[in-house]
Amino acid sequence: MAKLQIRKVGDEVLRKTCRPVEEITPRILTLLDDMIDTMRAANGVGLAAPQVGILRRIAVVEVEEGEVYELINPKIIARAGEQEGAEGCLSVPGRYGLVKRPQHVTVRATNRHGEEFEVTAHDFLARAFCHEIDHLDGHLYIDKVTRMLEEDEY
Ligand code: NI
């Protein structure tokens, strides 16, 4: 396992649309492992492949320690409600902003064994899924922020 370099805002790779994963190769599995290591080392709760320079539809999320979601080709298939809350991004270090997101989302994705699954998430986990899936289409939370937070607000 290895720690990968996290690309920062201004890097064009963060603005590209990622391609779907067509086959889960050993390289994809290594990437998933490395992304989890990288996310944890940076104290993040999520990481998307373009953040490590790979233009593939892959993201990892770990909001509750030990509860890791590996999302290959994820798609939001249902959303409900609305929440506004603070959001940050490993590609935008040291900054947070308020973003409106659905309160509940259902995501369909493929796991590392090539099996399709669905997960319904609420509250902060729903926010994390939306944020990471946005990355796969070149969107950063700073594009949709209601307001950036001042340092004394977080
Ligand atoms: Ni992010």
Image: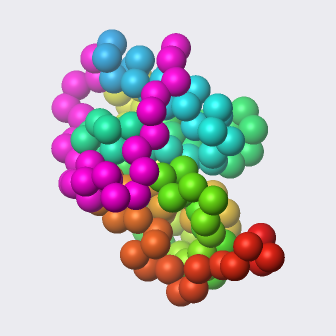
Query: Which of the 4 image quarters holds residue 89?
Result: bottom right
Q: Residue at x 67, y 67 (%)?
A: 123
Q: Residue at x 24, y 35 (%)?
A: 21
Instruction: Say which of 64 and 118 sits in front.
Output: 64
Residue 106 horizontal/vertical position (percent): 49, 60
Is 38 left or right of 55, judged from the image as shown?
A: right
Query: Which of the 4 image quarters holds residue 65?
Result: top right
Residue 139 horizontal/vertical position (percent): 34, 65
Can residue 100 be seen here? The reply is no
Instruction: Say which of 125 and 46 sits in front.
Output: 46
Give the magenta-colored segment's residue range: 1-25
Q: Residue at x 63, y 47 (%)?
A: 45
Q: Is residue 120 above or below residue 112?
A: below
Overall secondary structure of the magenta section: loop
Image quadrant containing the C terminus? bottom right
Residue 1 horizontal/vertical position (percent): 52, 14
Is 9 left or right of 106, judged from the image as shown?
A: left
Q: Is residue 138 above or below residue 58?
A: below
Can residue 19 be seen here? The reply is yes
